Image (cartoon, grey):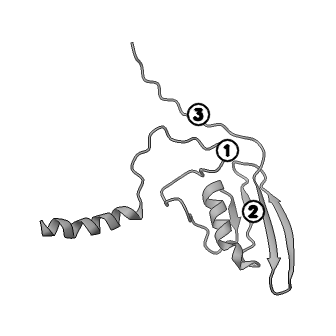
Amino acid sequence: METEVEEVQKSLTGGYLEVVYHLYSMEQKTGPVILRMRTQDRAEGVHLPSLTPIWRSADFQEREIFDLYGVIFDGHPDLRRILMWDEFTDHPMRRDYVEPDDYEYEPTAHDEVLRKTEAPKRARS
C-alpha cells in the first residue's frame, strides 16, 4: 500500500546575517574602508541601516542582498527585488531556504516576448 506524505520542514537557523562593505573613494584615492554590520538574528531582526544615502553606488548591491538574503536596509530609497520576480516570497541564498519539490510555472518577461513573436507566425498561416 502506497501513501503519499506531504511534509514541510522549516528549520530556524540561529545566529545572524553579516553584510560586509569594501568602500573606496576614487576622488580622494583612499580605501578600502571595510565596514561590517550584523543583524540581530536571522528571523525578525534582519534590519540594517542603508549606506545608499551616503554611498550612492551601494544601491544595487543592497537591493541584491535584500532579494537573495532578506536583509532589510532601513532608509534605502528603492528597496525592491532585483533578480527574483515580485511574487517570489523567499530568499534563495539563505542556508535555511528549502527548495521546492516541484518547479511549477514561473512568470518571466520572456513569455510576453514569445507571444509577440508567435502572433505574426499564426497570422501568416
- Give the residue at x 43% y 23%: 4
Side (left or right) of 68 relative to 125:
right
> Can you tell which quarter of the image residue 47 is in?
bottom right
Q: CA distance from mark 3 to mark 2?
A: 28 Å
Q: Earlier in the sequence, mark 3 or mark 2?
A: 3
Badge 3 marks a residue whose secondary structure is loop
Image depth: mark 1 or mark 3 in front: 1
Q: Position of residue 118 (x, y in %)?
A: 24, 65
Residue 104, horizontal then vertical, whole percent: 40, 46
Residue 115 against residue 1 in the figure, above or below? below
Residue at the disc numbered 1: 95
Name the element at disc 2: strand
Towards the viewer: 122 or 2:
122
Is 75 situated above or below 88? below
Q: Which residue is mark 3?
A: 9
Residue at 72% over, 40% down = 13
- The residue beneath circle 2 is 48
Kind of residue indicated by mark 1: Arg
Check if mark 2's residue and mark 1's residue have beta carbons within 8 Å: no
Which of label 2 and label 1 is nearer to you?
1
- Disc assigned to residue 114: none
Furthest residue to the bottom?
27
User: Which residue shows up at 70% across the image and 67% down it?
Assistant: 74
Q: Are marks 3 and 2 in contact (CB under 8 Å)?
A: no
Label 3 sits on what residue type? Gln
Q: Secondary structure at mark 1?
A: loop
